[in-house]
Amino acid sequence: MTSTQLLVVLLASGMGALIKSVTGLGYPLIAVPLISLVLGIEDAVVIVAIPNLAANAFLCWESRDAQAQTRDLGRLCGLGVVGAVIGTIALVNLPEQPLLVFLALAILLFLFQFIRKPEFGFSPAFTRRWSPAVGLLAGAMQGAIGVSGPIVATWFHSYRLPARAYIHSLTFMFGVTGAVQLVILLGQGQMTPDRLVGALVASVAVAVATPIGLRLRKRLAGPSFEKLVLLTLVVSAVALIFDALS
C-alpha cells in the first residue's frame, strides 16, 4: 500500500469519524466511497470494519447512561443478526443497484414526510410491532450491500429520542451487526496484511477525531442536533443514488 493510499485512508477515516462521533452515523458512508477511489470497494469495506466496530463500541459505552431511554433494541439487534447472515449468504445473488435506489428513496420519503409534518413520529406500540421486521431488513441490507446505517438512523429518528439515547441506539445496533460482519470477513480470510495496515491507520484517525467530535456534540442540542442528523441522512441518500448510478 502506497503512502498516498494510506493518506487517503487517514483523511477519509478522520472525516467520517468526526461526523459519526457527533451524529452517531456517517463513518462508513463517508470513508468507504473515498477509500474505494484509490483502493477499490472491497478493500475499503474490509479496512473500515475494525475501526468502525471500535468507534461504535466506544460511542455506545460513552452514551450508556441513556440506555433507559431507548426502545426495542433487543428486537432490532436480534433480527438484525439473522438478517446479516441471510444477506451475506445471498450476497452473490442480489443485484446491488436496485437495493441502493430503494434504500435512498425510502430515506427521502421519510424526510419529505418529516418536513411536511415536523412532529412526525411513531408510537411505542407501532415501533414495538414493526421493529423485528426493520431489524431483519437492516441486517439483510448490511450483509448484502454493506449499508444499513441510513435505514437504521431513519427508523430511530422517528422515535424522537433525546440526542444521547438516539446515539446509543444507533451505535449499539451498529456494533452488534458490525461484529457479525467482522467475524464473517475474518472467517473468509479477507483481512490481508495490507488491509490490516490500512485498518490500523484508519483506527489512528478514528482515535484522534472522535474526542473532537464529542466536544462538538456537546455544543449541539435540540433543533441543531436534529438538523445535523437530517442533513446527514440527505447526504447519505444522495451518496447511495450516486453509488447506484455510477
Image (cartoon, grey):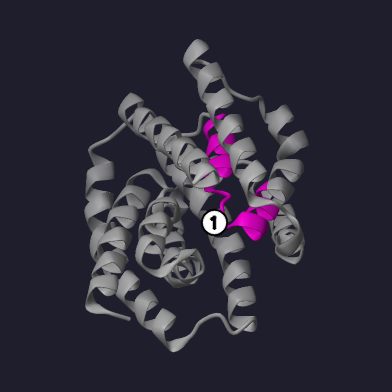
Q: Position of residue 109 (x, y in %)?
A: 58, 24
- Highlighted magenta segment, given as a residue range: 138-158
Residue at image location 48% in from the left, 85% down from the top = 192
The single residue placed furthest to the top in the displayed view is: 116
- Say whether residue 70 is visible: no
Identify whether 189 is placed above or below 164: below
Helix, strand or loop: magenta stretch: helix
- Which residue bears the numbered disc 1? 174
Q: Nearer the viewer, residue 195 or 163?
A: 195
Left or right of 45 on screen, residue 14? left
Residue at image location 59% in from the left, 62% down from the top: 176
Nearer-the-camera pick, 196 or 1: 1
Residue 147 pos. (x, y %): 56, 52
The residue shown at (45%, 42%) is 239
User: Residue 14 is drawn in which quadrant?
Assistant: bottom left
Image location (x, y in percent) of residue 105: 59, 30
Q: Residues within 10 Å of mark 1 (few under 14, many from 20)?
A: many
Extreme-front residue of the structure:
246
Tell me the kind of residue under disc 1. Phe
| Image coordinates for residue 73, horizontal then vertical, percent | 64, 49
Residue 140 in magenta stretch: yes
Tell whether 55 sits left or right of 6. right
Say which quarter of the image contains residue 187. Answer: bottom right
Residue 116 sits above or below residue 95 on the image: above
Mark 1: which secondary structure?
helix
